[in-house]
Amino acid sequence: MASPIPLRGRLRRYGTSYAMLLPFLALFAGFLLWPLANSLYLSFTTFDGINPAVFTGVDNFVQLASDTRFRHALGNTALYVVGSVVLGTLLSLGLALAFNGTSWPHRIMRTLFFLPSVTSSIALMLMWKWVLYPSDVGLANTIVDWFGGSAVAWLATPGLTIPILVLMSVWGGMGYGMVLYVAGLGSIPQEYYEAAKIDGASTWRQFRHITLPLLRPVTTYVVVTGLIGAFQVFEAVYIVFSQGANTIGGVLDSGLMIVPYLYDQGFTHFRLGYASAIAWVLFLVIFVLSLINLRVGRAMKEL
Amino acid sequence: MRRMMAACSTVLLAALSAACATSGQTQTQQANQNANAPVTLSFWSTGGDDETATFQKAADLYKQKHPNVTVKVQTLSWSDAYAKLLAAATSRNGPDIISGGMTWTIQFGARGAMVDLRKHGLESLKAQALPAQWESAISPDGSVYGVPLDMSTLALYYRTDLLEQAKVEPPKTWEELTATIGKLKAAGVKKPYGQDWGNLDWIGYFNYLYQAGGSFYTADCKPSLNTPQAEQALKYWVDLYREHGAPTATVEGADALDTGTAMVVAGNWIAKGIDINKPKLKGKWAMTTIPAGPAGPTAFIGGRAIGVTSFSKYVQTSTDFVKFMYSDEAITAIADEAKKRNISYIPPRPDKIVNGSVFTPEQAQVFEASIKTGKAAPGCPGWDESAPDVTKQLQSAILGKADIKTALAEAAKVMERNAG
């Protein structure tokens, strides 16, 4: 067994590399680690953004446990995450299977579906706001009108809020997932399919036993990034559904999600300590769910 | 190698010490309060660029009188103004003067970020301001962290052609309003009535509550939603939605008129733009005060407050500028520029609503009447925290998720809890 290189030797050998990394490390520590540590500290205080923070132990977390609006936001977010991740992943895969060729029509379709992913999310949300605008000016109600229906209050019907948010998320995100799946499909050796065909496997069996298992790493990536993105939904709620400072979560808080609630508490109610506690709870939720997802992915691989 | 590491460390140290030096400099920089030394004040104005330009005119006028003082007015959009002001207050580095929602200066003042203008003689402006609006700008402990900068109120905008078609006059009372909606429907008007400002929100209920003789709080700031007046008001408002078909979805007032709504309750700020943005409505619309309830015609009065930050280096000069904004000449300069830019501006002085107005005399009279009998948002402790929950309870009643009594009782409970 080779003996480890002593510190002085390692420094001599890698010193230049470490020195090159220093500027990045300084920025990383200054603009990420330090704020993160600060936010963790603030979550145990009653910091209002202006006056010095007062340490209050776990009070913020205890209060969170009995905060009905937070629980409501958590419930809404869970529904939204399930809807957008499941539908988004399925549709991404479907699109990838449909348009994974190299012909021009396939390339054009992939470009079209990918476009929302490279467009500013603010612009997209403003577009959705116009689509769902309640009067005849809104595109959705214009279409409803063509079919003889009466105008729908898209943004003021609590039962429609989560489905609309899921629709917006899936529409905007499935192109990105599709590109990842197309890359994944391209990396599956064609020999597997040829061997399966020789053995008389149907298209469905080929998909079930070759495509899906070999796409598992891509699926894990799409699901984990989808989960993280969905838990952090903000613009869609803030731009499309909030109607002024008092209704950040839309009518009856039907669109209240964790991050908009965090923003509301921190930046309109001066409760930055409480908002930090929400942020850390959100981090824990995402961390645990991602961990479960990775473990499940690994366990399935071993099956 | 060593030389390279030393160079890197030097660069990093230099960067760090520069950062520290800059921050220290900001904190220790002392104000030069010499009367004739050049002073530049930064005024962060919440609103649009056109509004900023109108206030800049007043600032330019101030400079003519005080050549050493330059006031730079910058726009903060409504959507992110609050967060930007909070960031400035946190770093104690930012504007000398701010304007924003009526309760903003109270909120920032309570945390030590605003100057109590009483200490600089600005309580004298009380005599010039509208009493109801002045009260809403005052903190519960009596501190004056901001004074009204302008006013906003509601009016009933209506399509003259559609009302003529139904042979009805614009309604003046609650009873007339529901009767008019019925007649319009009978005459084939599909959208007889809508609400823009305050739709599904506590501001919408505010009008009916005060018109029924109720209020959110008693004079000594006790929550007062458990009253027959509050019930009567909510029942009437809920019926407008559930019985008379007022839409729950909010359509901007001018759009609503343009797409065939016969009557719409909207803010004063749409009045100037209707003829320009919706040319086919020219000559087909008019406005009046919102219908009165059993206790009178009270309408909500909003507006912006202006105040001086506690971290300003030029507190005295800034307060003097705030005082100047109430002068005849400043109001005239702002109104003239607002006219040029076709934007609504109602000065904070009631005596200037008609004379210093940007509206036609008829429109100005409607707003004047509305403001004279109007009331502003409650300035009681805990109201800002309660408002979202009160709104939610009102929405529950409108959407049939709770009955009127339960919704009001729940709203009152929240207000009691937050009142401390």
Image (spheres, rainbow, N blue to C red):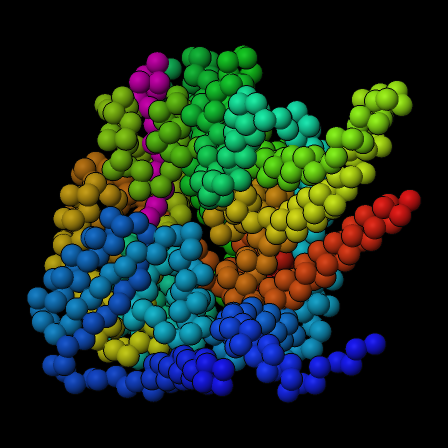
Q: Position of residue A184 (x, y in %)?
A: 69, 38
Q: Position of residue B348 (x, y in %)?
A: 26, 56
Question: Quick one: B194 or A90, which is closer to the camera?
Answer: A90
Residue B176 visible, this angle: no
From what the image shows, is residue A253 above or below residue B98?
above
Q: Position of residue B399 (x, y in %)?
A: 62, 35
In reply to whether residue B16 is colored magenta, the answer given is no
From what the image shows, is residue A282 above or below residue B362?
below
Q: Position of residue B98 (x, y in %)?
A: 32, 64
**Left or right of residue B294: residue A91:** right
Q: Which segment is the magenta one?
A: B152-165
Q: Residue at x 54, y 12 (%)?
A: A148
Q: Residue furthest front?
A: A2
Question: Quick one: A226 or B195, which is closer to the camera?
Answer: A226
**Left or right of residue A85: residue B240:** left
From what the image shows, is residue B390 above or below residue A207?
below
Q: Residue at x 34, y 70 (%)?
A: B94
Question: Quick one: B195 or A217, which is closer to the camera?
Answer: A217
Asked which quadrant contains residue B379, the reply is bottom left
From what the image shows, is residue B288 above or below residue B23?
above
Q: Quadrant of the C terminus of chain B?
A: bottom right
Q: Residue at x 27, y 64 (%)?
A: B43
**Left or right of residue A169: residue A189:** right
Residue B163 visible, this angle: yes
Question: Quick one: B156 or A17, which is closer to the camera?
Answer: A17
